[in-house]
Image: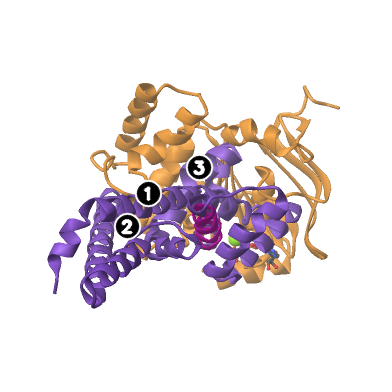
Amino acid sequence: MTQNLDTAVIRTIGLEKYYGIHQVLFGVDFSITEGERVVIMGSSGSGKSTFIRCLNGLESTQGGHIQFHGRDIEALAERDWRPLRRRIGMVFQDFALFPHMTVLNNLTFAPVREGLMKKAAAEERALALLERVKLRGKERSFPSQLSGGQQQRVAIVRSMMMSPEVMLFDEPTSALDPETVGEVLAIIQDLTSEGLTSIIVTHETNFARKCANRIVYMDAGKIVEEGSPEKFFTSPDTERARSFIASHN
Amino acid sequence: MNFDLILENRDFFLRAAGYAVVIFVASTMAAMALSLAFGSLATVRLKLIRMPVRIVIEVFRDIPQVVLLFFIFFGAPAFGLQLGPLQATILCLSLWGGANGAEIVRGGINAVPRHQFESARSLGLGSFSIFVAIILPQALRPVIPAYAGLCNILMHSTSLGALVGVVELLKSGQIVIDRASYYQGGSPGLTVYGFILVVYFIAGLLMNAGIRGLERHLGRSSKR
Ligand SMILES: Nc1ncnc2c1ncn2[C@@H]1O[C@H](COP(=O)(O)OP(=O)(O)OP(=O)(O)O)[C@@H](O)[C@H]1O
Ligand SMILES: [Mg+2]
């Protein structure tokens, strides 16, 4: 194993995923280095969500490897995934805040329950992060009292509470009103501009152009093209990518 | 109408009401524990656990309370178990209530969106923490009305104890009526059963008011 030479934080090698007998990922080779921002694009059903869900163990895989800092993790037991998931945060399309907890409790529950922080320290960190996403003052609110954009910002902060090394975003703005998409993207840009390694699945081409270090284009369960945003959006190599870009502009 | 009859038998009725309360409280508590345990087990992924649990729940839900009571009371000795009338009634209502409550709890758990489980999992939380602190609170709040309905039935069903000889309210009424008509002639049935009816009515009223209060309280704290 070339463990020490490998600069990838996460790498997949020939990753395969089946739902029952239905194959969804057909050998995905992917890697991301520290501080990189990779945007994954692709048409609906191409396996983007499935792929990033595999990266933090929400889905089992049936072939190939997932490596985290060079260590194979695809066959870990659920118990061993748990500490890893704190290092690989995930934000979902539908926010999935805990509706029966206040914003503050949503943020502090996991780190306190998992013994990562004392309650007072967790609350202090939560308030500082809320300040950063311009939600200071909402800590006593319940999720249902917030707009979609505000809820998604809280969900992002909830993942950040665990101080992850990598963040996975699965279409973080797809469920939002057009007016609030911008505020959430701005937050993601702000948080990732300090070198937080992140993989972002999104259909927002402007955001991808501006923010991504690299675009990965998936089609039918495979990565068919990847490269810099300029290259991808102006002169893609594949016909598939070209028609995808045409239909998303 | 002869209200003196009620007053004369005050202590007797009070003791009978006490039995009814004991049956109700004991079987409601036990049913609640069974509901939570079996309702939760009925939602686990492992089929080897889930299926038998669901079968047990279904069986006890499908048996009429009276039949179950007689089976327990008269059948228990055959299993080497000596159960008094009070114990048999409590056991019957606990099992019946537990099975029906488990079905309510199971429905509540299954109605919690899947993404709740996943987002909790992606924070590195363990299954037990997720279930107790994330899933259950969300599952139970919406089923409170259904569960309250079950508690109402259990309260009414305490009178089944009369059939195996528990001197609870209904049975005490019968005894008072029998005694009165033997010694004084004429049946005070209307008075006595009217009194019992009012007692049940008031108890039910109080319980439902309490449950509504609980719901309001929980509603305020979540503002869902
Ligand atoms: N839980 C599941 N069970 C069975 N099939 C699934 C499941 N989840 C996804 N699939 C299938 O896997 C394929 C890839 O789905 P996936 O959700 O990963 O696509 P996607 O690229 O994220 O699409 P979208 O842009 O619509 O979110 C699809 O054909 C989908 O129907
Ligand atoms: Mg998706």
Looking at numbered disc 1 in the image, what kind of residue is underneath it? His
* Mark 1 beta carbon near ligand 1 (under 8 Å): no
Determine which residue is flagged by label 1. Answer: A100
How far across and down, in percent of the image, does residue B141 sit? Answer: 39, 55
Residue shown at 42% from the left, 52% from the top: B23
Frontmost residue, B95 versus B7: B7
Q: Is residue B161 above or below residue A39?
A: below
- Colour logic: by chain
Disc sitting over residue B210 in the figure: none
Check the rendered structure and report the hue given to chain B. Answer: purple
* Mark 2 beta carbon near ligand 2 (under 8 Å): no
Q: Residues within 10 Å of mark 3 (few under 14, many from 20)?
A: few
Image position of B169 (left or right of A93): left
Label 1, label 3: how far apart the Cα atoms are: 13 Å
Looking at numbered disc 3 in the image, what kind of residue is underneath it? Val
* Numbered range of the magenta stretch: B88-101
Image position of B14 (left or right of B131): left
Chain ID for orange: A
How far across and down, in percent of the image, does residue B2 sit? Answer: 14, 70
Determine which residue is flagged by label 2. Answer: B224
Image position of A225 (left or right of A152): right
| Secondary structure beneath label 2 | loop
Which mark is first along the chain, 2 or 3? 3
Q: Are marks 1 and 2 in contact (CB under 8 Å)?
A: yes
* A137 magenta-colored: no
Disc sitting over residue B132 in the figure: 3
Looking at numbered disc 2 in the image, what kind of residue is underneath it? Arg
Label 1, label 2: how far apart the Cα atoms are: 8 Å
Label 3, label 2: how far apart the Cα atoms are: 19 Å
Is the stretch drawn in magenta largely helix, strand or loop? helix
